[in-house]
Image (cartoon, grey):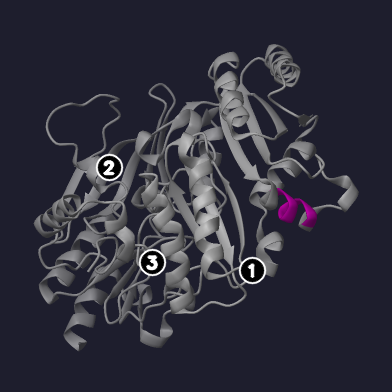
């Protein structure tokens, strides 16, 4: 052990190596506080060369290595293995270049998403990825989980924004293709293979991400609807009539809207009254202040006249816009009374959502008649979230809840994970929505790139 420590100190310096009890809890515990690990060492490299040297050393000693980002994931994917190495890239946090002509950003993996977004905005450019954990999630983390967020409907997942990558493989080999090209059909797309792999195939150290022109107008509204078919008709109509400007369509079931709005505002001050089946938070972004606003209002009026929307409120200021978004994003006060709870992030075809929700409720009630469950999601991209509470939680209850949700997902041909990854918590259920042949292929890829299984072992692929 002393020889190993000496090798690691030689790479990062004694100041940036932490051992056993000197490792802060935030590097050992995930946000749910369910998953934790006790690595022998935590290292904070400052360069790709140092990351490569660390992995070469770990590979030689056959030590597990886990990259630790903002620890905002909910699946335990970034919890370090006991006795292994934890790797924080927080010192590798620079925006290296913003190319306004190519509309790209070259950024280190440890850069916080919000800081990268703000750097883009300073150049009148937009990094489209936006999610609630923007202030702590890292670029490497959102690449590792293929994060989605609030604007997938218009600009896609993180993989749709990555043009180039630099990464270190399990044996310390550096592979780099920091290209700004939109199209490259020359052979296997290894970059896409690493995106969403949760640090099990390689460690991303730098990325080139695609930026967009910064919108200068934003229109936001909250709609109430009483029929799911109407929700889908509204989504299609907005996509058609807003000329591609629709960036968000966040659908909330009535129980979610009730709980969140009542936790934030007085009963008489809700943006829209209770009593409707669905509430949709919609947002459009554009570049013509007067024309965009007029078009948005005209479309909302049209939807009301068609009877697709039962009620609507349009944000008239940034303060009102933020108040509407708070209902969807500021969930802590609303879900606090539900603790302990189990949260889910699943996906399916849009038309299957009502069937899934009905089946999931029925499955849960069959086991726990007094269960409380709230549903919400991005919906425009087929992504639904659920929070489930039965008043207590242990491993057996968690498994029962998991099976109730995932069986309903499997019945509609969906996926157990839409955007938060698999990690530890979902790995045992991967066979429910992935075939044995697919999982065998995943194992083959893992074995080829990481034959000693040192990169984030135990995550993503079921044991």
| Image height of 23 relative to 11, above or below | below
Which one is earlier in the sequence, the residue at label 1 or at label 3?
1
Occupied quadrant, residue 59: bottom left
| Image height of 425 relative to 281, above or below | below
| Residue 44 visible here | yes
Q: In which quadrant of the rendered image does the N terminus lie?
A: bottom left
| Image height of 87 relative to 443, above or below | below
> Which one is in front in this view, the residue at disc 1 or the one at disc 2?
1
The residue under label 2 is: 165
Specify whether residue 99 is painted magenta: no
Which one is earlier in the sequence, the residue at label 1 or at label 2?
2
Which residue shows up at 41% across the image and 47% down it? 418
State the image coordinates of residue 130 (x, y, percent, origin top left): 53, 42
Q: Nearer the viewer, residue 375 or 320?
A: 375
Crowding near pointer 2: few (<14 within 10 Å), some, many (20+)?
many
Numbered circle sitting on residue 122: none
Tally of numbered tags? 3
Cα distance in 3D space between marks 1 and 2: 49 Å
Which residue shows up at 72% across the image and 31% down it? 221
Cα distance in 3D space between marks 1 and 3: 24 Å
Question: What kind of element bears circle 3?
Answer: loop
Question: What kind of element bears circle 2?
Answer: strand
State the image coordinates of residue 440 (x, y, percent, origin top left): 14, 55
Q: Which residues are magenta?
A: 257-262
């Amino acid at each position: 052990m002393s020889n190993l420590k000496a090798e690691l100190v030689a790479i990062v310096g004694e100041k940036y190596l932490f051992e056993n009890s000197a490792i802060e809890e935030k590097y050992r515990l995930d946000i749910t506080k369910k998953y934790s690990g006790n690595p022998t060492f935590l290292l904070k490299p400052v360069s790709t060369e140092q990351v490569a040297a660390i992995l070469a050393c770990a590979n030689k000693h056959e030590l597990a290595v886990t990259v630790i980002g903002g620890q905002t994931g909910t699946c335990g994917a970034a919890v370090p293995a006991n006795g292994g190495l934890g790797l924080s890239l927080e010192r590798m946090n620079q925006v290296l270049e913003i190319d306004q002509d190519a509309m790209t950003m070259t950024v280190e993996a440890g850069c916080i998403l919000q800081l990268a977004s703000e750097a883009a905005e300073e150049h009148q450019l937009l990094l489209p990825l936006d999610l609630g954990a923007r202030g702590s999630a890292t670029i490497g983390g959102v690449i590792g989980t293929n994060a989605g967020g609030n604007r997938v409907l218009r600009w896609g997942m993180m993989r749709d924004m990555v043009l180039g990558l630099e990464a270190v493989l399990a044996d310390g080999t550096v592979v780099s293709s920091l290209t700004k090209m939109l199209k490259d059909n020359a052979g296997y797309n290894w970059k896409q293979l690493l995106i969403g792999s949760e640090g099990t195939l390689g460690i991303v150290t730098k990325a080139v991400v695609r930026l967009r022109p910064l919108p200068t107008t934003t229109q936001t509204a909250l709609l109430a609807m009483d029929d799911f078919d109407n929700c889908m008709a509204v989504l299609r109509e907005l996509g058609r009539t807003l000329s591609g400007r629709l960036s968000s369509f966040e659908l909330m079931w009535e129980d979610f809207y009730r709980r969140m709005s009542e936790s934030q505002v007085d009963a008489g001050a809700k943006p829209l009254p209770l009593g409707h089946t669905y509430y949709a938070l919609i947002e459009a972004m554009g570049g013509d202040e007067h024309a965009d606003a007029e078009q948005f209002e005209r479309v909302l009026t049209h939807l009301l006249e068609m009877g697709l929307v039962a009620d609507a409120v349009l944000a008239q200021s940034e303060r009102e816009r933020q108040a509407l978004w708070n209902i969807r994003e500021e969930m802590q006060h609303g879900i606090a009374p539900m603790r302990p709870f189990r949260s889910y992030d699943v996906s399916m075809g849009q038309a299957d959502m009502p069937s899934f929700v009905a089946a999931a409720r029925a499955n849960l009630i069959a086991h726990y008649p007094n269960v409380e469950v709230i549903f919400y999601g991005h919906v425009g991209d087929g992504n639904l979230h659920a929070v489930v509470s039965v008043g207590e939680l242990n491993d057996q209850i968690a498994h029962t809840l998991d099976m109730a949700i995932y069986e309903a997902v499997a019945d509609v041909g969906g996926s157990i994970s839409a955007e938060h990854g698999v990690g530890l918590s979902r790995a045992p259920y991967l066979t429910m929505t992935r075939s044995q042949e697919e999982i065998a292929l995943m194992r083959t890829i893992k074995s080829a790139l990481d034959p000693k299984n040192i990169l984030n072992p135990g995550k993503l692929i079921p044991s």
